[in-house]
Amino acid sequence: MKYQFLDIEKKWQQYWESNRTFRTDDDTGKPKLYVLDMYPYPSGAGLHVGHPEGYTATDIICRYKRMNGFNVLHPMGWDAFGLPAERYAMQTNIHPRVTTEENVNTFRRQIKMIGLSYDWDREINTTDPGYYKWTQWIFLKIYDSWFDPRLKKAQPIQTLEEELTSRGSAGLPLEEHFTAEEWKRKSPKERHDFLAQFRLAFVAEIPVNWCEGLGTVLANEEVAEWTEKGYTVERRPMRQWMMRITAYAERLLEDAKELDWPVSTTEQQRNWIGRSEGAEIDFPLKGRADSLRVFTTRADTLFGATYMVLAPEHPLVESLTAEHLRSAIAGYKAQASTKSELERGIEKDKTGVFIGAYAINPATKQEIPLWIADYVLMGYGTGAIMAVPGHDERDAEFAKKFHLPIIQVVDGGPGAAEIFVDDGVSVNSANDEISLNGLKTPEANRTITSWLEKKKLGKATVQYKLRDWLFSRQRYWGEPIPIIYLEDGTMKALPETDLPLLLPDLKKFQPSGTTESPLALATDWINVIDPETGLKGRRETNTMPQWAGSCWYYLRYIDPHNDKEFCSSSKERYWMPVDLYVGGSEHAVLHLMYARFWHKVLFDLGHVSTKEPFTRLRHQGIILGEDSRKMSKSRGNVVNPDDVIAEYGSDSMRLFEMFMGPIEEMKPWSTKGVEGVFRFLNRVWRLFVKEDIGLNPAIVNKQATPDFERLFHQTVKKVGEDIEALRFNTAISQLMIFINEAMKLEELPRKELEQFLLLLAPFAPHIAEELWEATGHKGSLAFEPWPSFDDAKTIEDRVEIVLQVNGKVRGKLEVPQGTNEQEIERLARLDANILRHLEGKKVIRTIVVKNKLVNIVVGG
RNA sequence: GCCGAAGUGGCGGAAUUGGUAGACGCGCUGGACUCAAAAUCCAGUUUGGCUUACCCCAAGUGGGGGUUCGAGUCCCCCCUUCGGCACCA
């Protein structure tokens, strides 16, 4: 009988499905293991060969761990809200629900053909109302929370309200303070507005990235992705939902240290959070009572601050601008506002305008001019800087262009650059009260900062590049935000009992023509009367971004059919955290940061038991086309998994994708390579099955030869260790070595061969099941115990000793394992070639490493 | 520019704590089987030199230096590729 892979694979896939072999019980008797794949967006193009790479890797781990007695949770689902389905609907008027369902069916069919051991009873879909009900529920939890800076954690908003009612704002780090009495005297609207400033989900009027082509705004992190695809993104101020991820900057940074994640990923998150320590300094404004606050990491250069720059959007610009410069300033502001931050960055030449006002340098008491320039960003620090052109390249460039004074206040030593930006020794930095001269930069920094603190002119602070997360999108195909705007100007969250707030069934999906989503046209849906107050209200027309559903899907798999809770807490405590998470590195800062953020909020509120969701993370590398270039339709180098499976079977595809190289590396597809592993599986098949006869009669109940037994133990050891370390390529190569040796035998020991099938099973489960059955076993091998090995039996009884003279290999010697040093050295000195190299030389020393080598060092 | 990862045969890639560089697979070469082919099996395959001899010699893990009896592996400098960030004060 030939290796009929198509029949075999179909047979076992049906077996697993009808026997629900991989259904996971929440049985706490066994140790748990939660292995998660990043669920796919079910696009119209179907699966490509990149998907099965990560999925196969996790599947191998799962199958291996089940055989090792673990209770494994391994689910799959669909990230099904999103742009492509909606854009398709705009063109065809086919409801996104319909295309999404079709695409999901295609993906599911394709994924099932790979023979992955998912528990399909736990399948989830983010567009399912039973799912997004809980996405909305979590949104409301976040909305109804605030971040208490004293506890450094989220708290229900009521705790803030109660505190204000009982103690006023005394305990809070605020600019303005009021008593409990004053709080109580505020109108309901005033209290509502005040609390709104603290919520973790809040509405703000801010400059956002508006993409006309997409008809929606984009988060800062998303801009690059779409501009690369040719869309234009402009800045415009809009009212948007935001999430206060910045409150968690420190914890996101700190907790990442304990994660077993790729360094490049944690490093990217670090950069994105962008923590920097420095000081805030207040510069008194000339002729006014107030001052201008800046952030700097180099307070030590204060004496060199010769001018200041405000971002064009800075709120003080308006009142500071001198009358005769008003039109010029307005012109510059208009120009700057149309430019995106990206464009601002690309333009090398610095631009800016003097606004006709001055501040006082608190150290030198000098009057210094105020400018606006778009190289200063409103979104970072205080939106204003003290410019130190002597020690900052950007400031220097600006100062040279506009002929502003440049003073040296740091000595970089001999050979230092003209504009010295590194740490050095302070010079020219003294006034009547303080001198920094002679101090090294860190010391100078501390000294000036404490002086400023004493004078109440500034204080040490920490700044982050991380900005709050822009959470709303102007689209139809997303989770509705369960908020109503009432006619009295307040916002009201939907009660939990009203969830899910369903998407209305639209007939047309064209953009609304305004900056609102197509939901604005669903008038029946939008207009509501609040049953509690009788007030008229209007629903939020923005929907959530695609990331929302993926921020918590790993929790829903734990308890996917629960309609009382998003996830039962006992199940959550059993399964969490995710032990292994595998997916693309493109999610390094987006999904992986948002999900961590939501998880921490849920943790603070007591809904989950771990502070981090994913303990061990790995990225699969991209699979390139056969021509080593990125797969793309236009290049015609796309490999379709369906075709590969039809020709070689899914076991071959799985095996090849794992054999190509390290999982995280980028590597090219190779049809010849697939043929290679296909040949291997055919050899395995023929070893067990003889054509027309059935089971190979050479398989006998006999003791294996010592050599073969040793190889078997080595193979069990290596395959297990390699799977644990995700080194699938070397595990497979060991399986190949085992089969190559077995092929040489006249008689095949039954025990070792059957056990080999168990080693093969995680990689090529279908053929392993079929041969397991052929060797007389009943049912699936999925829960057979993993073969064990005896370390003593892996050791070779004879070892090859390398003979070196001066570190160069001059001969080899085979001796029994464990032969002592003296004996090895004696034998080495008998080797003809060694003697030749020692001839006429003086032996200086001899190094002998047991079981490894002899190195004779000679001189002369 | 800054941060991170990585450079090994014709190709994908192996190589515990420094100890035989090139496992395994692909490709290629030769052979067996066959009327022939496919499939399969066997042998060879880093480069160069020498030779009757696969004996031996030399070089060799991006380049240059260093530590060491011994370096793909450790240290310093440089180059290249990939990924990310990019006026963040």
Image (cartoon, grey):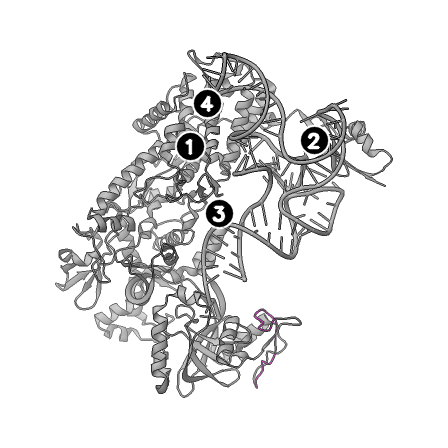
Q: Residues within 10 Å of mark 1 (few under 14, many from 20)?
A: many
In the image, the segment drawn in magenta is A417-432
Q: Kindly check if marks 3 and 4 are in contact, taking CB atoms under 8 A apart as contact.
A: no
The secondary structure type at the circle numbered 2 is loop
Instruction: Tell me the amino acid under the disc marked 1.
Output: Met
Q: Of the residues under marks 2 and 1, which one precedes in the sequence?
A: 1
Instruction: Tell me the amino acid under the disc marked 2.
Output: Asn
Q: Of the residues under marks 3 and 4, which one precedes in the sequence?
A: 3
- Find disc 4 in the rendering and name its residue: A682
Locate residue A35 relative to residue A138 in the image: left or right: right
The secondary structure type at the circle numbered 1 is helix
From this view, report whether residue A410 is shown above or below residue A732: below
What is the x, y in percent for residue A814?
71, 25
What is the x, y in percent for residue A232?
34, 60
Q: Residues within 10 Å of mark 3 (few under 14, many from 20)?
A: some
From this view, report whether residue A246 is shown above or below residue B18: below
Residue shown at 54% from the left, 31% from the top:
A718
Which mark, residue A653? Answer: 1
Q: Of the residues under marks 2 and 4, which one precedes in the sequence?
A: 4
